[in-house]
Image: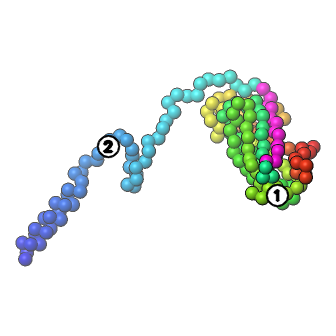
């Protein structure tokens, strides 16, 4: 009986020893953390190409329309560099309900929407707001033009941030939805 136990203990020890040979294997494809393969981080080895600073006043304009479902669509034009990230918000004045979308400037413009519930927007007063997050969170190509703190931005839409993150863009337009469509208001 004692011999049988020794055989079983020996088998168990050899099985446990066979589970690993004490050497770590690294094929270089992925790092393992907690038993889960982690993808390799991609490092941008090339810095953004040197570009001329943005030397114009920021131009920003919007046009709005109701689509076939009576929801709001916003199209904008701007001279901001391609790749600039913006946030577009539509808000109903009476209730304060708002809809937001993040967009990227492409070829001098951007589009957002549709804004509103599936049943469409009710008549009334609304606001459209376009903002630019701080330059520090913009792509490297945009930062190289606008400056790391937005220091190359100028014009009536440029404001300083409350938390020391430099200059950003804030613009706002008022409008009314009426039976005949959308009317911009002063």
Which of the 4 image quadrants contains residue 74? top right
Q: Is residue 159 magenta?
A: no
Q: Which mark is residue 26?
A: 2
- Nearest the camera: 151 or 66? 66
Which of the 4 image quadrants contains residue 111? top right
> In which quadrant of the rendered image does the N terminus lie?
bottom left
Q: How many marks?
A: 2
**Closer to the camera: disc 1 or disc 2?**
1
Question: Mark 1 falls on what kind of element?
Answer: loop
Residue at screen point 55% across, 28% down:
47
Stretch of the chain drawn in magenta: 56-67
- Location of residue 67 in the rendering, given as x and y in whole percent from the top left corner: 79, 48
**Farthest front residue?**
68
Q: Which mark is residue 22?
A: none
Above or below 183: residue 34: below
Above or below 126: residue 152: above
**Farthest bottom residue?**
1
């Amino acid at each position: 009986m004692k011999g049988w136990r020794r055989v079983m203990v020996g088998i168990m020890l050899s099985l446990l020893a066979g589970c690993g040979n004490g050497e770590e294997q690294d094929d270089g494809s992925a790092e393992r953390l907690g038993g889960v393969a982690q993808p390799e981080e991609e490092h941008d080895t090339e810095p953004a190409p040197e570009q001329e600073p943005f030397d114009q006043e920021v131009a920003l304009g919007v046009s709005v329309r109701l689509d076939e479902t009576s929801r709001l669509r916003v199209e904008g034009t701007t001279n901001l560099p391609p790749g600039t990230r913006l946030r577009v918000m539509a808000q109903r004045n009476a209730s304060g309900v708002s809809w937001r979308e993040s967009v990227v400037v492409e070829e001098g413009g951007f589009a957002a929407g549709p804004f509103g519930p599936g049943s469409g927007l009710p008549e009334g007063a609304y606001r459209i707001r376009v903002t630019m997050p701080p330059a520090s969170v913009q792509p490297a190509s945009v930062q190289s033009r606008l400056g790391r703190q937005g220091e190359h931005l100028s014009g009536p839409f440029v404001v300083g941030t409350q938390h020391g993150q430099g200059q950003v863009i804030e613009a706002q337009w008022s409008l009314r939805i009426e039976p005949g469509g959308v009317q911009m208001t002063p």
